[in-house]
Amino acid sequence: MTACAAAPADAAAPGLARRLACFVYEGVLLFGVVMAAGLAYGVATGQRDARAGTLGLQIVLFVVIGAYFVYFWSRHGQTLPMRTWRIVVVGHDGCPPTPLRATLRYALAWLWFLPALALLGLSGLHGGVPAFVTLVCGVLAYAGLTRLHPQRQYLHDALCGTRLVSLQPPPPLR
């Protein structure tokens, strides 16, 4: 018997619109996390020019964002946006993923962005508008791949042995 309140084995995957709304909310929340980490990095390194130390900043942000997701996924199976949209990530046992599996999920979740970023790099397109359009199209194409999975799961979830499931809404207050 597991020590968690396991999600029901027959729990369905949340709808794509709900998952994408959660994705956008996650981006809004991560904006604050990234700003705080960037400020801490700038102060700690004495950075005075935005063009200096960008690789170091990128590494720090990758680690900070990863720590955020791994902590919440492995502890509760949810981040705040996932809790708001009643979505939980679980392993095959119905419990939140282990820290190792959550780390693997974080690494593989970059599949959301890597093809679009590679396309931008190979095409030579520069600027905010081409980057935005390419990333949005890439994210929507990646999300659309859920239609090919029998349980409507993302590719990174299928690869690392996790799945997103819907939680039932709480009963109404009386």
Image: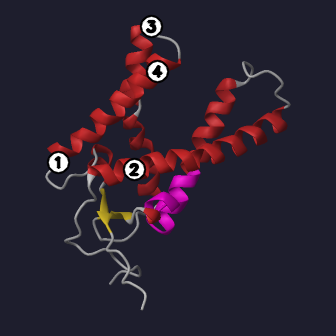
Q: Is residue 59 left or right of residue 106?
A: right
Which residue has dot 1 on it? 149
Three-letter amino acid code at the position of disc 3: Gly
Above or below, comparing residue 135 to residue 149 in the picture: above
- Cα–Cα span, label 4 and label 2: 21 Å
Is label 2 or label 1 in front? Answer: 2
Total number of numbered discs in the rendering: 4
- Cα–Cα span, label 3 and label 4: 11 Å
Which residue has dot 4 on it? 131
Identity of the residue drawn at 38% across and 79% down: 170
Which of pointers 4 and 2 lies earlier in the amino acid sequence?
2
Quarter of the image for residue 91 reads: bottom left
On the image, the x and y values in percent for residue 51 come to 72, 18
Three-letter amino acid code at the position of disc 4: Ala
Q: Which residues are magenta?
A: 67-82
Quarter of the image for residue 12 reads: bottom left
Is label 4 or label 2 in front? Answer: 2
Circle 2 crowding by C-alpha within 10 Å: few under 14, some 14–19, many from 20: some
Which residue has dot 3 on it? 124
Q: Is residue 25 left or right of residue 67?
A: left
Identity of the residue drawn at 83% across and 38% down: 44
Above or below, comparing residue 87 to residue 144 in the picture: below
- Cα–Cα span, label 4 and label 1: 28 Å
Observer-nearest of 44 and 120: 120
- Cα–Cα span, label 1 and label 3: 33 Å
Which residue has dot 2 on it? 21
